[in-house]
Image (tube, rainbow, N blue to C red):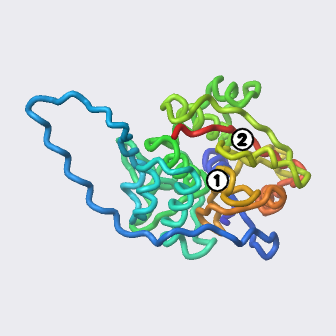
């Protein structure tokens, strides 16, 4: 991963959007990754049905209308039909994330050194739109043919597919007292180092306001050290919007909330499914045991040549939510 080198706003975005993962040779990772079909071209949208001269009364036939696709998918090179079906049919979260990750896999960068950890898909009215990079206070369009999604950019796509199709990056960065109330924390400074905390809280807030959840989120704080510390994330049903933080040993013990992921119960056996984006693997949904997750957040995610994170300072903060099906 490219090491952060800039100061000020550029440093902040490199901090909060840059998620590092070292080589699996140094830190063994689970190998039973989930796969789906290869992506195909997006079909042409159906033409709208002409309006009747006299509007008919709505008929409640018990069939739910298809759910909207994420607005960002307009800018994808292609969208796997299985991913489209998973979203529009309101499939379970595991299937949605599985098809999303597999569908984008063919469009990832050639090597970890090519990864632009500031990349995300920008939607809205003001250009530039589509795949962009944000740094030093500026948003710039990525070169033609480049489809870079950094850590936060990948998380944002997962949240759009699961919860709020038009969720925006600036909504994740919002900072007010309600953010900290959602997390059960006293007010903190609205610094770029706390972006990860604000991102998970704001995702839950916006999703709840959009009636995508059965209720408000529940804050969870974990300081992992033992093999069973993540067992509390195993119950079936809830999703966990999570951020990982460490203290930097080179920056006066500054705590940086520098990684974002979505965690849920895996299918079949007693394990978790972890959705995240790193320079080494790209966007993935991986099956991982609670024991291995402890190693992942304390070791692989703590490896950074610039900040030299203290593994013993590892914190994982989550907001537990339940999707409305």
Rendered location of residue 309, percent (x, y): 83, 55
Q: Nearer the viewer, residue 179 or 10?
A: 179
Residue, disc 1: 14
Give the number of the mark in front: 1 or 2: 2
Q: Nearer the viewer, residue 184 or 49?
A: 49
As drawn, the residue found furthest toward the front would be: 61
Quarter of the view holding residue 95: bottom right
- Badge 1, how many Cα within 10 Å: few under 14, some, many 20+? many
Residue 241 visible in the snapshot: no
Q: Is residue 210 left or right of residue 1?
A: left
Q: Earlier in the sequence, mark 1 or mark 2?
A: 1
Question: On screen, 318 above or below 184?
Answer: below
Label 2 residue SS: strand
Label 1 residue SS: helix
Residue 255 visible in the snapshot: yes
The residue positioned 75% from the left and 48% from the top of the image is 234
Rendered location of residue 156, percent (x, y): 54, 49
Residue, disc 2: 318
Distance from Cα at disc 1 to Cα at disc 2: 22 Å
């Amino acid at each position: 991963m490219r090491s952060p080198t800039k100061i000020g706003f550029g440093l902040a975005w490199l901090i909060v959007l840059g998620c590092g993962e070292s080589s699996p040779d140094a830190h063994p990772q689970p190998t039973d990754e989930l796969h789906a079909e290869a992506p195909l071209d997006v079909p042409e949208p159906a033409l709208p049905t002409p309006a009747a001269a006299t509007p008919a009364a709505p008929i409640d036939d018990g069939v739910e209308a298809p759910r909207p696709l994420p607005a960002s998918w307009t800018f994808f090179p292609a969208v796997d039909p299985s991913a489209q079906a998973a979203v529009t049919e309101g499939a379970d979260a595991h299937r949605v994330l599985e098809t999303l990750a597999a569908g984008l896999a063919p469009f990832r960068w050639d090597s970890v050194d090519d990864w632009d950890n500031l990349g995300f898909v920008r939607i809205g009215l003001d250009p530039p739109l589509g795949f962009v990079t944000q740094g030093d206070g500026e948003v710039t369009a990525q070169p033609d043919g480049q489809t870079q999604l950094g850590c936060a950019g990948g998380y944002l796509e997962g949240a759009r597919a699961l919860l709020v199709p038009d969720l925006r990056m600036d909504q994740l960065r919002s900072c007010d007292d309600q953010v900290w109330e959602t997390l059960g924390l006293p007010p903190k400074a609205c610094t770029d180092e706390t972006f990860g905390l604000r991102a998970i809280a704001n995702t839950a807030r916006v999703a709840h306001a959009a009636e995508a959840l059965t209720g408000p989120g529940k804050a969870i704080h974990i300081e992992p050290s033992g093999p069973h510390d993540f067992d509390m994330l195993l119950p079936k049903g809830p999703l966990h919007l999570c951020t990982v933080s460490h203290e930097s040993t080179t920056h006066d013990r500054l705590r940086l909330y520098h990684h974002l992921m979505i965690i849920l119960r895996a299918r079949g056996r007693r394990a978790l499914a972890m959705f995240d984006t790193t320079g080494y693997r790209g966007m993935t949904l991986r099956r991982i045991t609670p024991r291995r997750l402890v190693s992942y957040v304390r070791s692989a995610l703590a490896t950074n040549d610039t900040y030299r994170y203290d593994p013993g300072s590892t914190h994982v903060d989550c907001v537990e939510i339940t999707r409305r099906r």
